[in-house]
Image (cartoon, helix red, strand yellow):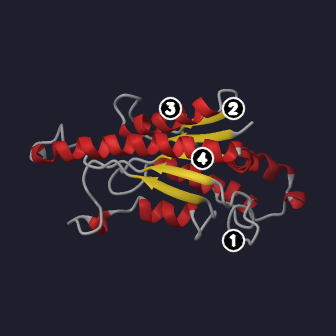
Amino acid sequence: MATLLHIDSSLYPLGASVSRDVGASFRKAWESQHPDGKVIHRDLSANPLPHLDASAAIAGFVPPADRTPEQVRDFALREELVSELEQADAVLIGAPMYNFTIPSSLKAWLDHVIVMGRTTGTENRTAAGKPTTVIASRGGGYGPGTPRESFEFVQNLLGKMLGDGGCGLDVEFIVPELTLAESTPGMEGLVDMAKASRAQAHESAERRGKEIAASLAA
């Protein structure tokens, strides 16, 4: 039975959030292939994680057998989150762009699950190779050659932290752009491009969900 770890970080609910909506297309396709499968869904907006504190951070550098009872207690949440990542067969992350980067709630999750000598910083990274899909929605356009290309700190950040520079996950981005075109004065001429980008994102998410499910079932 395959397990999908689904992380949402948008402030807005399904129907008002493009990253959630596109993620739902992926999940629906996944679940159609795995009706009896398991989905671990963490909604970081509805149930935000505490920021990593010094005690939990220090405990991550101590071998488990050497931790004090206090360190075991302080590392408990990190252990839970890391175990979810390690036990998942695939990962889906909704990562809307807020102020040119990821939501702080998603950064908090990353700070908990990136553990030196376990999920990163070792030849035997415990989550390496897992197929990971990131729905990186954004209100404007930040692709190569655009005026705001240098302001893109979502794919650049997550590509490094989740990919080869960090956890070693097999990351693919789906990027619906111009999501604010229909509601922002001055972007009226971009509405058709926005609709096309969103439609393509849904198609890509559905295809990706089916492909990953099929590969795990083989």
- Mark 3 to mark 4: distance in Å? 27 Å
Q: Nearer the viewer, mark 1 or mark 3?
A: 1
Q: Which residue is mark 4?
A: 212
Q: Nearer the viewer, mark 1 or mark 4?
A: 4
The spot of residue 182 in percent (x, y) is 18, 38
Marks 3 and 2 in Cβ contact (< 8 Å): no
Q: Quadrant of residue 202?
A: top left
What is the residue that sits farthest to the right in this orientation? Answer: 65
Closer to the chain start, of discs 3 and 4, is: 3
The spot of residue 162 in percent (x, y) is 57, 60
Q: Which residue is mark 3?
A: 46
Residue at image position (34%, 47%) is 176
Give the SS element for disc 4: helix
Circle number at residue 37? 2
Q: Quadrant of residue 217?
A: top right
| Number of numbered discs on residues | 4
Q: Nearer the viewer, mark 3 or mark 4?
A: 4
Q: Residues within 10 Å of mark 1 (few under 14, many from 20)?
A: some
- Mark 1 to mark 4: distance in Å? 27 Å
Amino acid type of disc 3? Answer: Ala
Residue 139 visible from this viewpoint: yes
- Mark 3 to mark 2: distance in Å? 24 Å
- Mark 1 to mark 3: distance in Å? 31 Å
Q: Nearer the viewer, mark 3 or mark 2?
A: 2
Amino acid type of disc 4? Answer: Ile
Amino acid type of disc 2? Answer: Gly
Q: Is residue 121 above or below residue 56?
A: below
The spot of residue 173 in percent (x, y) is 45, 55
The spot of residue 206 in percent (x, y) is 47, 39
